[in-house]
Image (cartoon, rainbow, N blue to C red):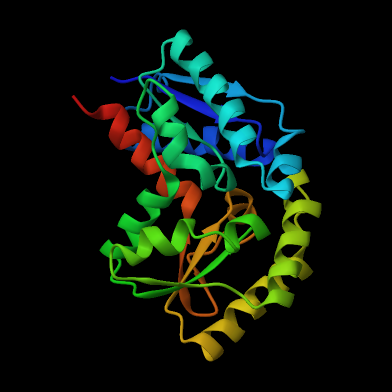
Amino acid sequence: MKILGMIGGTGPESTVEYYRRLIAAYYTRVSESGAPPIIINSIDNKNLVKWFTAGDLAAVINFLAAEIERLVHAGADFALIAAVTPHLGFGKLQQRVSIPLLSIVEATADAATKGGLRRLALFGTRFTMQAPLFPEAFARRGMTIVVPNEEEQEFIHEKYMGELFVGTILDETRDALVEIVERMKQRNNVDGLILGGTELSLILREPTAAGLPVLDTTQIHVDAAIDWMLRE
């Protein structure tokens, strides 16, 4: 069985959720005794938001590459980053490290293809919603990504960073997010919703929102990680 290395700490709440779900998926797929081989590097995230805000992706890549190599030295066979926004530099990051990285974006695009979805709304941080990361990956599979309007993006980003990132879950925020989905359903004719930020799965836990299927990127990433772990 391959050893998973996980970069955590980019969002402490989602890191805990990843570990909990990895254990649950392992119990379901493999055994209810024992535990999957996971090495976690909980990084200091204080500079990441600053670098993303400044558009300094090179600094992000340099930092994450060094932290992933710590996992390599600890014995990891492959790695994932328990957050979406750091995937903005995924391609260059993969070139810099010596083990395979499991992309949350590619795993989600595969899941959307299997689900027969064609036109999906994307929620996440402002950095994720405004980047070509998801649109390019989904376009390669014949799908379209639609982002909220500017005002909606600002609301989602503020709630993400100000509430979800620190573990604050409010019913009124959940209701407002679902209202945005409903508006996009009517306005943009979307047929699914991507939770393009791992903390979003802490507040939008239902399999549907406004009648649309929800792609929980955290769960998709976790399931793909167990698949990789079990590969011969």
Q: Is 85 situated left or right of 216 in this image? A: right
- Residue 227 percent coordinates (x, y): 29, 36
Q: Nearer the viewer, residue 223 or 162?
A: 162
Q: Residue furthest right?
A: 162
Query: Visible in this render: residue 30?
Result: no
Query: Visible in this render: residue 71?
Result: yes
Look at 37% across and 58% down and name the residue there: 137
Q: Residue furthest left?
A: 232
Q: Nearer the viewer, residue 231 or 79?
A: 79
Q: Is 67 situated left or right of 115 in this image? A: right
Look at 50% across and 27% down and name the residue there: 6
In the displayed structure, 4 sits above or below 207; it is above
- Residue 197 percent coordinates (x, y): 59, 53
Counting labels gives 0
- Residue 210 percent coordinates (x, y): 55, 79
Q: Nearer the viewer, residue 14 or 30?
A: 14
Q: Is 182 situated left or right of 31 in this image? A: right
Q: State which quadrant residue 221 falls in.
A: top left
In the displayed structure, 159 sits above or below 2; it is below
Look at 58% across and 21% down and name the residue there: 41
In the displayed structure, 178 sits above or below 111; it is below
Q: Residue furthest bottom?
A: 186
Q: Quadrant of the C terminus?
A: top left
Q: Quadrant of the N terminus?
A: top left
- Residue 132 percent coordinates (x, y): 49, 60
